[in-house]
Amino acid sequence: MKNRVRIKDIAEKAGVSTGTVDRVLHNRGKVAPDVKENVLAVIEELGYQRNLLASALAYNHNLNIVSLLPNPEADPYWKQSQAGVQEAIRAVQHYGFNLTQLFFEPNKPMDFSRLAKQVLNNPPDGLLFPPIFFQESLWLLNQCQEKNIPTVIINTDIKGGKPLSYIGQDSYQSGVLGARLLDFGLNDGQTVCILNLDYETKDAHHLIYKERGFKDYFKNSLEKKIEILSVNFESFHEKTKLQIFSKKLLAENPKLGGIFITNSRAYKFIDSIADKKSYAGIKVVGFDLLASNIDYLKSNAINFLINQNAMNQGYLGIMSLFKHLVQKESVERQQYLPLDIVVKENIEYYIERNKVGIII
Amino acid sequence: MKNRVRIKDIAEKAGVSTGTVDRVLHNRGKVAPDVKENVLAVIEELGYQRNLLASALAYNHNLNIVSLLPNPEADPYWKQSQAGVQEAIRAVQHYGFNLTQLFFEPNKPMDFSRLAKQVLNNPPDGLLFPPIFFQESLWLLNQCQEKNIPTVIINTDIKGGKPLSYIGQDSYQSGVLGARLLDFGLNDGQTVCILNLDYETKDAHHLIYKERGFKDYFKNSLEKKIEILSVNFESFHEKTKLQIFSKKLLAENPKLGGIFITNSRAYKFIDSIADKKSYAGIKVVGFDLLASNIDYLKSNAINFLINQNAMNQGYLGIMSLFKHLVQKESVERQQYLPLDIVVKENIEYYIERNKVGIII
DNA sequence: TTTTCTTGTGTGTCCGCACACATTTATGCT
DNA sequence: AGCATAAATGTGTGCGGACACACAAGAAAA
């Protein structure tokens, strides 16, 4: 390498052995104060930067990383995050990164807790999970902090607890953006509907923020008068119930001009509408590039998808652990991913990205 | 590392020395046919994968990469690509990547040629440049192929020549997307204007494709009747001329509903309009996140910016060279970057990305 | 038959760093 | 002063792979 400063160079210049330099660099063993100071000065002067390759090679340990994700079979949204995690691990495997994948059932806090305990029994070098269940997640987060396990949380941020980093969306802003996109197609006097197709939302702060962002947009935009309707529907997995619900929603709101579906289940709503003409002219904004959503986007049944970059959540999550554990650099507490606006005309570029993966 | 297969393991199992395995792996030196076959079989069986770290460390050579970009001082667009290149180099510097940056004047083919010759006189291990001048670029590309210099071209693709990869936008599709975005705000019977603020366009295939994509969109969309006006203006750097031009454009086209500026100079057009009210209601779609464009987007003077990911062009360009030179994996001939749709509400996420850069 | 060359294979060193162990120097105590 | 012990520092080996060099055996030339 061109003029790269090595430990040996420092040792020479400081008139000590490489062992001593090593002790200074790693704060291990005893070094005479004046020698230490001198060595540090030389390090500074020569601008030493550790060779990551040699360092990782010599370190020769495994770094066991655990990903604790919702079962992707139960909710396809999580397939993307999982793919991102795997991709990242592949990229840094040479640095000794080992992945253990654990999956919990999306709506079973007990299952999550069970696995959380399992993780703590055999503490990994790093952990990644989405804190879907508030109490249980906070507990896990605190346990990890106690045991010094650097932890990255994705998808949903959480107050309290000290994760290494949160990686995900800015919920509030995604609501604002959703409103803006719907606003393009709305006329004065129309109604828009915020539709939550999710289980009980008391823990789901991100949905609350999303909704707030959405409403705030219209509060601040004074050009048109738009009525906002907010609806929760929990039985989204029961097709007939959902059909009845949808039909009623459309029937009862003749002035409906737009629907904002706050998670990745826009396709479920479209699925449920038997008579596709009954919502002609109603604009639909949803989230995330699930296969079903993509199909509906292409067939114009969905107008916009906001891409939350679920894949990148996983990817950057692992990379943040890498940055912390291997590069030993500081990691931002919050890393917001871009809210990509996806339409029929640009969706191809968001499917199957990562041609030339992401390194650090 | 967990069960990682090493050369030593292969050697043992095949009953030869590591030197012989090395010779087989690198096709160097002479190996008896039967031995070679056996070693290959063992490699296959154990699923050997070279340890990139150890390999790069032992290789101990510099890889000199040259970036040949338009002078960013002359055209701020190129600042982003430059930043991407630098960021990528930083990420892979440990693998011996060294960068030499050369800059040519954006509208001087002679200057480009001069530097091209300079590059060839001292052949680098990899080259990256945007083929702005067709003839000159094609010549350079062919020379590089002859001398076996892997070359990545960015921003503009070129027919003929065999680069390692092209990284950039799909011009045609960006035109389609621009049309789609304008279409949101257009009413029946209005006019849209395609505005090229660039020097003579005979070499600029990407502008031609962009225009074609734009027109094709409206050809295929039968809902409204929209008239399309296409205008070139070369003296965009002369403020008064541009002012006169803009004024005339607006005056002569009272039904103008949208303007599609085909490159990153949308801000120049807005700058030139003295009476901001004269284009009230006219939608503007431009390209790229230059500081000036961003300001106008935030103040609603520009409605949409299509982000061509100029930064990523540079980043992925270098990473592709890395993939080829270090990872020795194949690289896609064409790597299209996403056409991000940027509005006021999501722009923050596109500015200053790369919190946790990309590694391999 | 001896010498020289070719072919095939094994061995050793180095890349930069981490870490264990060896060695030297300083300090305290009798 | 002499010795035990602690503090400070130096040396050596290995991580996995690349590559130069050493060396043996057989073939070709003398």
Image (cartoon, coloured by chain):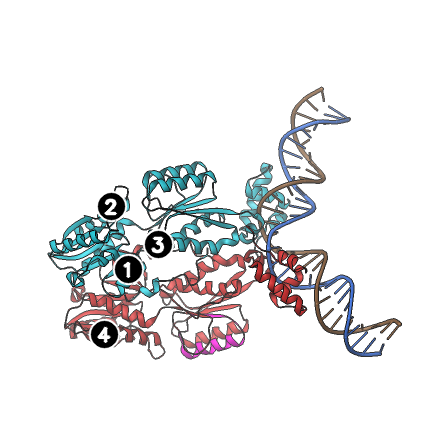
Chain colours: A cyan, B red, C brown, D blue
Q: Residue at x 34, y 62 (%)?
A: A350
Which disc is residue A293 wearing? 1
Q: Is residue B317 magenta?
A: no
What amino acid is labelled 3 in the image?
Ala
What is the secondary structure assignment of the residue under circle 2? helix
**Of label 3 and label 2, which has the lower sequence position?**
2
Quarter-of-image position of residue A302: bottom left
Q: Residues within 10 Å of mark 3 (few under 14, many from 20)?
A: many
Label 2: chain letter: A
Given contact means CB atoms under 8 Å apart, are the residues at marks 3 and 4 in contact?
A: no
**Of label 2 and label 1, which has the lower sequence position?**
2
Q: Report whether residue A34 is seen.
A: yes
Which range is magenta?
B131-153
What amino acid is labelled 4 in the image?
Asn
Question: Which residue is identified by label 4?
Answer: B220
Provide residue B346's location: percent of width, then percent of height.
Answer: 28, 56
Q: Report whether residue B262 is seen.
A: no
Question: Which residue is identified by label 2?
Answer: A208
Question: Which residue is identified by label 3?
Answer: A310
What amino acid is labelled 2 in the image?
Ile
Q: Do circles 1 and 4 both sit on a common chain?
A: no
Q: CA distance from mark 2 to mark 1?
A: 23 Å
